[in-house]
Image (tube, rainbow, N blue to C red):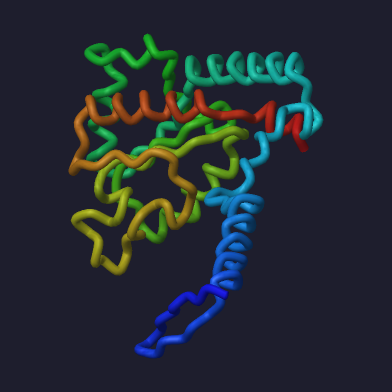
Amino acid sequence: MSMALVTRRGTTWRLPHRIVSESLHSASSATATAPTSYCGPPPPPPASSSAVGISRPAEFVISKVDALMNWARTGSIWPMTFGLACCAVEMMHTGAARYDLDRFGIIFRPSPRQSDCMIVAGTLTNKMAPALRKVYDQMPEPRWVISMGSCANGGGYYHYSYAVVRGCDRIVPVDIYIPGCPPTAEALLYGLLQLQKKINRRKDFLMWWTK
């Protein structure tokens, strides 16, 4: 019987050649029959709209209804005239003939029940905060708030005053922040255009349908 030398850690054993060949043959056959997989199963396909109860034609119609509603809202933003300090002068400047907000459908309204947007322009004091919240609650849904100027954003020059609210977002939710002391009329106009883009991304009818 032929012998084979096997060396491991400085020790030598003599094994029959038949045992060595059989062990090598069994190892090669096991490798051939069970290949190693280096990747997991493929991810499941994304759920279709029908899985949540909406067919494709219905989803198309609902998206078009949302687009129509958003188009109407962006073309008819009616801000509430809520000037508190010197930023209100720039807000009046924006509403004048030079910038002509009427061409965007933006018309200032004197009543909160006719408004869907509030521009907080100026310093908000602790004494004025309840009135601000009351006017905000009187606005119909959907409604948006624009914080205009450093004082409305975080207190600004009067940040450490005992009588000033350090940001109107502590009283009402804010959608657009406009920096500056005071911001220019162009900055307010840019903020209103950003608000129009935010309104265009709303999916109110779709969210109501899927509930």
Q: Residue at x 59, y 40 (%)?
A: 138
* Residue lying furthest top: 103
Q: Is residue 91 left or right of residue 62?
A: left
Where the C terminus falls, by quadrant? top right
Q: Position of residue 93 (x, y in %)?
A: 24, 24
Question: Image quarter for residue 104?
Answer: top left
Q: Residue at x 71, y 14 (%)?
A: 61
Q: Position of residue 192 (x, y in %)?
A: 37, 27
Q: Is residue 33 left or right of residue 170?
A: right
Where the N terminus falls, by quadrant? bottom right
Vertical order, 157 against 115 (above or below): below
Q: Residue at x 39, y 52 (%)?
A: 168
* Residue lying furthest front: 1
Q: Nearer the viewer, residue 26 or 83?
A: 26
Q: Nearer the viewer, residue 146 or 5?
A: 5
Vertical order, 63 against 131 (above or below): above
Total number of numbered labels?
0
Q: Position of residue 75 (x, y in %)?
A: 48, 15
* Residue lying furthest bottom: 11
Q: Position of residue 170 (x, y in %)?
A: 44, 57
Question: Image quarter for residue 63?
Answer: top right
Q: Nearer the viewer, residue 39 or 101?
A: 39
Q: Residue at x 51, y 50 (%)?
A: 133
Q: Is residue 155 left or right of residue 17?
A: left
Vertical order, 28 against 42 (above or below): below
